[in-house]
Image: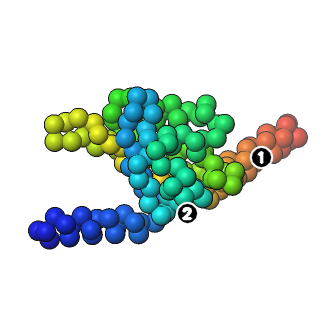
């Protein structure tokens, strides 16, 4: 496809129809200001684009700003490095979702950082199942310890 306009239209259609949330943000000081969100991001978070564009995306963290993954993301953004991590976010209605977030810096033709591309995937089910498995394994370990004490 040689026509740049056709290629751009196809790319936009693909992004608009992606299952994962896709955002584009500009770095402004320590903030990353959202300038684009796709419909999947709107469905994932419950926010419409007009409610959140031109804001820093940290609003999704709610009061959970001390997560280790947030520190990892901040360090990567400050270093203009790509990063992938899982963090707890909050939808517009206040419900929790676990977000596998991939952030990639984009550099222009003169190697200046211009944007970040974020891809978000809801991994809540996987996190909840892992937490349940961890809890069950802890219970099994306790029962084994008790059984050993009773057999001693």
Q: Is residue 137 above or below residue 149?
A: below
- Where 142 falls versus 30 (above or below)? below
Picture quarter with the N terminus? bottom left
**Residue 34 x %, y %:** 44, 46
Viewed as shown, does residue 98 lie left or right of 115? right
Q: Name the quarter where the C terminus is drawn.
A: top right
Q: Which residue is mark 1?
A: 139
Q: Indicate the secondary structure of the residue bearing disc 2.
A: helix
Relative vertical location of residue 34 with respect to residue 38 in this rendering, above or below = above
Is residue 92 in view? yes
Which label lies toward us, 2 or 1? 2
The answer to whether the residues at label 2 and label 1 have Cβ atoms under 8 Å apart is no
The residue pinned by badge 2 equals 43
Residue found 47% across the figure and 58% down from its top:
21
Nearer to the camera, 126 or 68: 68
Where on the picture, by quarter, is residue 125?
Answer: bottom right
Across and down, in percent, residue 53 comes to: 47, 49
């Amino acid at each position: 496809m040689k026509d740049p306009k056709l290629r751009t239209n196809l790319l936009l259609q693909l992004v608009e129809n992606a299952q994962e949330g896709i955002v584009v943000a500009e770095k402004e000081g320590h903030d990353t200001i959202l300038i684009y969100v796709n419909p999947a991001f709107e469905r994932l978070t419950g926010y419409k684009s007009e409610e959140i564009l031109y804001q820093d995306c940290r609003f999704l963290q709610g009061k959970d700003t001390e997560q280790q993954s947030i520190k990892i993301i901040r360090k990567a953004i400050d270093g203009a490095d790509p990063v992938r991590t899982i963090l707890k976010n909050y939808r517009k209605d206040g419900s929790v979702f676990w977000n596998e977030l991939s952030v990639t810096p984009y550099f222009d033709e003169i190697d200046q950082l211009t944007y970040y591309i974020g891809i978000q995937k809801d991994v809540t089910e996987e996190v909840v199942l892992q937490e349940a498995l961890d809890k069950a394994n802890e219970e099994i370990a306790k029962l084994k310890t008790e059984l050993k004490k009773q057999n001693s």
